[in-house]
Image: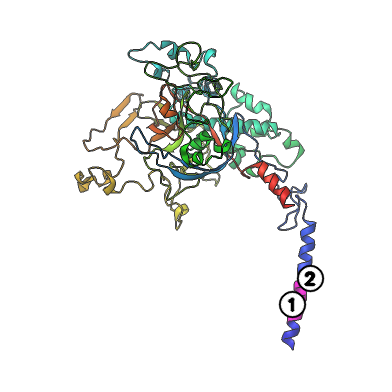
Amino acid sequence: MKKYVAKVVLSSFLVVGTLSSCKNSSSSSSKNISRATGWKINAKEGGFQYNSDFKEQETPPGTVFVEGGTFTKGKVQDDIMHDWNNSPTQQHVQSFYMDETEVTNVMYLEYLDYLKAVYPPENPMYENIYRGALPDTLVWRNRLGFNETMTNSYLRHPAYAEYPVVGVNWVQATQYAEWRTDRVNEIMLVREGFLSEDAMYGVVNGEVNGTFSTEAYLNNPESVYGGEIDSLQGKQKRDSINVFAKRSSGIITPEYRLPTETEWEYAAQALIGTREYNNYRGRKKYPWEGDYTRNGQRVGRGDQLANFKQGKGDYGGIAGWSDDGADITAEVKSYKPNDFGLYDMAGNVSEWVADVYRPIVDDEISDFNYYRGNIYLKKAIGEDGKVDVLRDEIVYDTLPNGRVVAVNLPGEIKEVPIGEEETYLRTNFSTSDNRGFRDGDPGSSRFFERFSDEEEDNRKMYDSPSHKVERDSTGKLLRQYDTSNYRTSLINDEVRVYKGGSWRDRAFWLDPAQRRYLPQYMATDDIGFRCAMSRVGSKSKTKKTIRHKKAK
């Protein structure tokens, strides 16, 4: 009997508790009341501060939205080059943003102007920051061709302002993207009142000692602008307790970066404009519809749809009608965009992507946001327990071609490889550097049986020459070339993929699935780049809104 009574009493408490829970649930429907605790969010008295008014990610400057989806990466058609490096694999890509055009000369000159103003090359400490970012204008020279006009004028003359920048290697392109991230976030914070305009222009004019770094601001805001940020804050300091923006504020954008090869190919194919089965299965030949490079529509019939080499000694066609409008590169937006609104995803210049090159895409491991090139780092922590912000210390690296580039800029956070603390008992990754994951068993290496036991470290699939280039204390270039007779490949972890045809290429290379590679320190007159940015939140705002309405 006592047990039965106890059960009834307990049931009563459960009913009361359920009713109470329902009451709290209805009373906490306000977006500024926590559904977890019932506490106020963004209360003037203090407590948890969060951007509960956030709607969706703002389209970053210069980019267009690319809604993610599934597609066939690579081709099922014959490979006339016999590279066999683009076997078809089914992939899925998350939504992202991508520059609507290649980065142009004027866009890159803005970057150079900033570096020259903030880090004067006359200062020995900063000497190689500006020089390391300069494009190689000598790429235009040809032993048996007269191209000095482009060598002298292509980068800086206003006639070429809206032409894609070339002569930029992969390392320089990634550094430009990092710089762009900081500048965009800086102006976002000015717009939202967390910084004053004096902060931005004061740095360029030499009135502020130090610069803005996104990661430094998020992790140790007092270190930004050389420690002078208190005097450079905007109206938020006066009007609220939100002195500094946080990642939870929703104002800081994700980083600009090079697109992955999968993202680039997906964006170039632009299947959003078609639902044909053959295209979906990887048979769409160009970023536009059809199997021809000329316009078949009534308006503009016969016009070339891209800037490419039409034949031997034919870089544009006969002057006048049927000419593609360019002999070298063309001004961006000279041709129609694809169905995503992206210009020149075929022709004009080829483009660097983020991936390390391998002939095989390992879709057995990943068919979602596929990318080879992950190096996981963590922020270095100083003796004071805070992140280690590099003040006057600059780390330089000498590339194999002798060019010196800055690995970091003053004011940035020092990063170090992850260690056992982060990898212990993990199943998804075990090392910091994953560029060579699932590479290099001896049996897969050509002539592996020739190697002795002492050379076991070299018994791998991609044993490219290992040259050493450095500079001594006087700046003299020291070169030590690898003279081994047993090297079997030019592929290594510093070789990057570039995509798309250029003004120098025949129509075959306009196919988005085609892939080529080049060492990341090299630059040419026909390779440029564009930036991408990941989308956070919903895959598509429109579909999210429609589904929400249907649910109601």
**Label 1 Cα neighbours within 10 Å, binned few <14 / some 14-19 / many ≥20:** few
Q: Which residue is mark 2?
A: 16
Q: Which residue is mark 1?
A: 10
Seen at 63% across and 24% down, the residue is 202
Residue 494, image quadrant:
top left
Q: CA distance from mark 1 to mark 2?
A: 10 Å
Q: Is residue 22 magenta?
A: no
User: Where in the figure is residue 338, as x and y percent of width and height?
Assistant: 56, 30
- Position of residue 81 in the picture relative to residue 377 (left or right): left
Numbered badge on residue 29 = none
- Position of residue 49 in the picture relative to residue 387 (left or right): right
Nearest to the observer: residue 546 or residue 296: 296
Residue 173 seen anywhere in this rendered image of the structure: yes
Q: Is residue 11 magenta?
A: yes
- Label 1 or label 2, whichever comes before in sequence order: 1
Q: Considering only vertical position in the picture, is 219 above or below 231?
A: below
Q: Taken as a whole, is the magenta stretch helix, strand or loop?
A: helix
User: Where in the figure is residue 71, as x and y percent of width and height?
Assistant: 50, 42
Nearest to the observer: residue 40 or residue 67: 67
Q: For numbered disc 2, what is the local secondary structure?
A: helix
User: Where in the figure is residue 444, as x and y percent of width and height?
Assistant: 28, 46
Question: Looking at the picture, which amino acid does disc 1 mark?
Answer: Leu
Question: Looking at the picture, which amino acid does disc 2 mark?
Answer: Val
Q: Considering only vertical position in the picture, is 129 above or below 192?
A: above
Query: Which residue of the protein is positioned furthest toward the front in this rendering?
Result: 298
User: Where in the figure is residue 44, as x and y percent of width and height?
Assistant: 78, 46
Task: Find the magenta span and give its range.
Answer: 7-16
